[in-house]
Amino acid sequence: MADDDRRDDRRPDPDALLALADKDRRGKLTVFLGAAPGVGKTYAMLSRAARLRADGVDIVVGLVETHGRSETAGLLDGLEVLPRTRVSHRKRMLEEFDLDAALERRPSIVIVDELAHSNPEGSRHPKRHQDIEELIAAGIDVWTALNIQHLESLADLVAKITGISVRERVPDIVLKRADEVLLVDLSPSELIERLKDGKVYLPESARRAVDRFFRLGNLTALRELALRRTADRVDDQMVDYLKQNAIDGPWATGERLLVCVGSDVLSEKVIRVASRLASGLNAPWMVVSIERADREVETPERLQRIETLFRLAEQLGAETRRVIGHDFVDEILRLARREHATQIVIGTRRRGRMDRFLSRSLPEALAKRASGLGVYIVTPDGGDAAFAKRTLPMPRLSALRQATAIASGFVAIAAAIGKVIDLIVHLPNISLLFLLAVLGAAVSGGYLAAFFAAVLSTLAYNFLFIDPLHTFTIAAPHEVFALFVFLAVAIIAGGFASRIREQAEIAGIRAAALQSLYDFSRKLAGTAKTEDAIWLTVSHLQARLKRKVVLLLPHQGDLSMAAAWPPDTELDVTDLTAARWAHDKREAAGHGTGTLPNSRFEFRPLLGPHGIVGVCGIEHRDERLDLNAERALTAILDQTAIALDRARLAEETVQQAARLEGERYREALLSSISHDLRTPLATITGAVTGLRQLGERMTPENRDDLLQSIEEESGRMSRFVANLLDMTRIEAGTLKPKQEWMDVTDVVQSAVERTRKYAPGRLIETGIAPDLPLIKGDSVLLSQVLFNLLDNAVKYGGEEPINVYARRDGKDVLISVTDLGKGIPPEDLDRIFEKFYRRGKPDGRAPGTGLGLSIARGFVEAMGGRIHAESPAWKKKGTRIIMRFPEAEPSAMEP
């Protein structure tokens, strides 16, 4: 096949197309990036805005800081400027960007200067870049300005270059997600000249800036950082374009970084270095923290430190993960191979000669075993002494006192028992008692108590049992050797015993947490209703966390509180706003997050398999949740989301089944009406047409026949309509029968006479017992029931007689209607009272609407009776329908 006829199998990258589609639904972010203040970012932004405004583009200024520069302020003329909102901050009134005004105005483009600005306390978001994200999510394009030193990943590098720590920072992910990055460049010498001319700051501020920040070396380094970051962003855009259009080109190298961090100070530098390395390689990266499975070494401070590092890594665009294992090197390498990492980034501290002699460091072990992987080692800064030392954790004074008391108690008991034994019999291995004391102290008080017990046991054994007694002098050399061996064995045994104790405590804590989750899962699995699931969740979380818990569910387009524990918990306006944000954005909001941190609750979205199902709020306390509580909370919320989603689907299934049943009934009703009303209508129409056309030419007998046909078919139609109305009353629950005394004999005779008029050719026999008592009910409804049963017998009983009997049966009054037709199959006996169910006649047709027996059952049950069918009725044929009504109590009879 020729090359030009060959099918092109190249296809665009689906992930790239999905990202492009998501961008089309959102607003676009344009960042004017500069190396330092004064390069002209705001000026360039306003100049471009003026040109677009002249072309008719709806562009407004949400906030611009001119810093007293007259040439910049002059560009605001002719542009629409939104009013600012006044915010109280530290007893001062500040004018800030009005986010709600911009959302209400909804222009095509809004200018919001100073991307790295921090909002005052009490604002909806703590950072301005979060305000801009909300504008973009609302479909509004945003222009903003940023200096390179405000990027989070460059903060430590900028501080090292300039000697100034930048407080206002922006996560790198904000710049990475920008749709357009415009570099506003100015040479360092020109910028210094502008500064000296007073075009950047006021003269006094300008002199301080030249001396401290605006030095030629600083500006050159910052300019290089800005150029490199802009080039990286352009490269990202080029790769996205190639993927979206399936064009072969300079693809990314395929590097992937795995970054290992702990709770030490160096880890922050490791993350920042890894971020710059990933940006330079255009590679994805993952930050991982490894915890030991056999011990609980994470203190609340260490957990807080890890959480802070993870948030920093996520802001810089990394994926984060926790790993539990015994062998750190093995776990790191296993994760690196599973995630297809090509490089491992890890920090190392300076180690002394003794440390290097006793053990190999983690980076060294990784470098030796990481076959095919690159290991990038980050070292501490030379001037930072904190990195050069390893500080040992010092126990608290209370822990020292407790360990000393436990050790002294066990050693004293062992010494006393040993003295008693020594008085009775001299044993050469009396030291084993002190070894038991060390083990007991280890189990009771941990390793610190075991160490103290080992030292005290050594001294006590020497003082009380080694010659010369009651001195710490040792006469025999072999006793010295035995004593040191005893000390070493005691310390080792105590360490093992304390380690087993710690592991037992950890296993107990994790087993209790696992049992709690198991109990919750089992209870949750047994709930079928949404209300049961939400109350079970809030009560379990409150008992587990000892904090107030609220759960909100969507209702009529808004969030409403579905459950809270304690039940009197209330939410204020800030809390509800944070809950709505968590629901709409599907991310955590409220206390401890970047959105509405002044809320009393932290709100987390409940994400089920089919989307968000609600929001859960956890009350803020001074102490943070520990690691086990955090894991339990995450697992409970995940299971609750699945349960709520399952309950919603079950409710939708029931509703769908009801709709299908209603459609089936409507189809059956339309089929019945179209069939059974067409015949009488055709008969009536034909009779009326004949009477009108023939008139006086017809004989009196023929006219009477036609009029009789009109009368009969009109009565038939009237019965159909009456049945439909009766069925409607039964279904709606509006049927309220009278409760009056009635004579069954009169009702039976009335119904029989009515049927004989309708079917004059049929034989209807009656048998009524003479001692029938009165019953309470509605005689009109009972007469209609009997007529429906007799009508059914006329249709399906063939030409055989119809029997109606009424008699007493114990304390019931029994009324039966029997026909001698072909009968009903046993499998259909329970269905004949269903709506629209019809059996075919011998000729194959199914007459009627199928409502007669269903109406009869509704009327009988409404009057407190029971009805059922029997077939065959007599000699293996026929059908008998029996009604039972309770006999009235004699005390209830009227005088």
Image (spheres, rainbow, N blue to C red):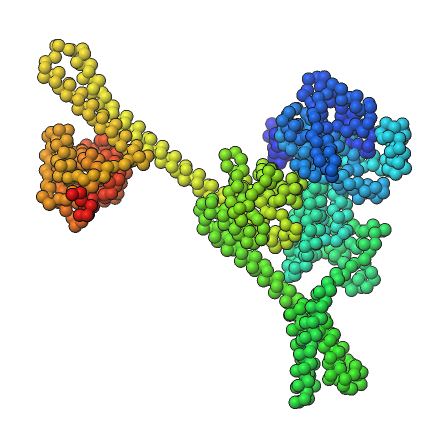
Q: Is residue 4 left or right of residue 527?
A: right
x, y percentage for residue 469? 76, 86
Q: Is residue 232 left or right of residue 542?
A: right
x, y percentage for residue 544? 56, 54
Query: Quarter of the image containing the N terminus?
Result: top right
x, y percentage for residue 626? 64, 54
Q: Nearer the viewer, residue 664 or 722?
A: 722
Vertical arrangement, residue 163 with respect to residue 398, above or below: above
Please name the residue shown 82% across and 23% down the image.
71
Vertical arrangement, residue 512 with respect to residue 554, above or below: below
Please name the residue shown 78% across and 54% down the image.
348
Please name the residue shown 26% across and 40% down the image.
862
Quadrant in which residue 571 is drawn: top right
x, y percentage for residue 184? 79, 29
Quadrant in which residue 773 is drawn: top left
**Farthest residue toward the front?**
895
Please name the residue shown 15% across and 11% down the image.
695
Q: Is residue 300 visible?
A: yes
Q: Is residue 241 visible?
A: no
